[in-house]
Image (tube, helix red, strand yellow):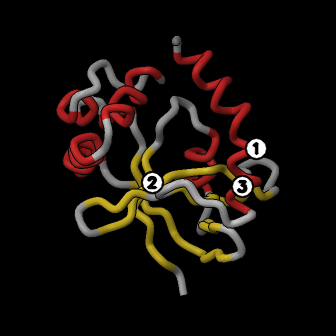
């Protein structure tokens, strides 16, 4: 399946995932990321995986030109929620060289589908931990910092 077809398929299912998440039916590390639109200022909600890596919590871009990435870069804070629980957080973009070990760990610790997703979406050329780490300059990674 090519990257564009894969993205269209995922976009069709996102509203279903958002609805189930709002009901409290979670899927593994999935959370709802709500961030102000960078142009409209209106809240935008995306289902997103929050990954435990190297003792921290991280969100990793899985699709090229993902709107949430640009919105997060422009925002001071975001809301991460699941069901009726939500918390405000700050997402700090990880520098490219620091992304490599995190991406390597993400792919090595997950099922093969994790590395394959980066290849399917065109972000990486190789689904191995080293192959995805080599694509770090094309894959945004954000560290989740809690806001009190």
Please report whichever mark, 3 or 1, sits nearer to the chain's N-terminal start: 1
For the residue labelled by badge 1, is the local secondary structure a helix, a strand or a loop? helix
**Residue 56 figure quarter:** bottom left
Give the residue displayed 61% in from the left and 46% down from the top: 68
The image's mark for residue 144 is none
Is residue 139 found left or right of 72 in the rendered image?
left
Residue behind mark 3 = 20
Name the quadrant containing residue 135. Answer: top left
- Closer to the chain start, of discs 1 and 2, is 1
Location of residue 74 with respect to 14 vertically, above or below: below
Residue visible at 76% across and 44% down in the picture:
15
Residue 15, disc = 1
Residue 82 picture location, percent across and down: 63, 67
Which element is circle 3 on? helix
Residue closest to the eye, 11 or 136: 11
Which structural element holds mark 2? strand
The residue carrying pointer 1 sits among few (fewer than 14), some (14 to 19) or many (20 or more) residues within 10 Å by Cα, namely some
Is residue 117 toward the left or the right of residue 78 in the image?
Answer: left
For the residues marked 1 and 2, what is the alpha-carbon distance in whole angstroms?
A: 19 Å
Q: Residue furthest top?
A: 2
- Which residue occupies 43% across, 62% down? 92
Across and down, in percent, residue 27 comes to 55, 54
**Frontmost residue, 9 versus 43:** 9
Determine whether label 3 and label 1 are within 8 Å by CB.
no
Mark 1 or mark 2: which is in front? 1
Mark 2 or 3: in front is 3
* Crowd band around label 2 with a 10 angstrom C-alpha radius: few (<14), some (14–19), many (20+): many
Name the residue located 63 percent from the left edge and 68 percent from the top edge: 81
Question: Which residue position holds label 2?
Answer: 59
- Residue 111, given in percent of the width and then of the height, sits at 32, 39
């Amino acid at each position: 399946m090519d990257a564009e077809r894969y993205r269209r398929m995922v976009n069709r299912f996102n509203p279903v995932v958002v609805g189930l998440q709002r009901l409290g039916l979670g899927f593994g590390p999935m959370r709802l990321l709500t961030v102000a639109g960078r142009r409209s200022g209106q809240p935008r909600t995306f289902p997103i995986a929050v990954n435990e890596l190297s003792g921290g919590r991280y969100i990793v871009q899985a699709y090229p030109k993902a709107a949430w990435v640009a919105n997060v870069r422009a925002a001071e804070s975001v809301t991460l929620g699941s069901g009726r629980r939500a918390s405000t957080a700050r997402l700090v973009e990880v520098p490219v060289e620091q992304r490599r070990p995190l991406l390597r760990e993400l792919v090595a610790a997950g099922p093969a589908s994790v590395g394959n997703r980066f290849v399917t979406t065109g972000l990486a050329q190789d689904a191995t931990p080293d192959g995805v780490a080599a694509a770090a300059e094309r894959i945004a990674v954000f560290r989740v910092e809690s806001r009190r």
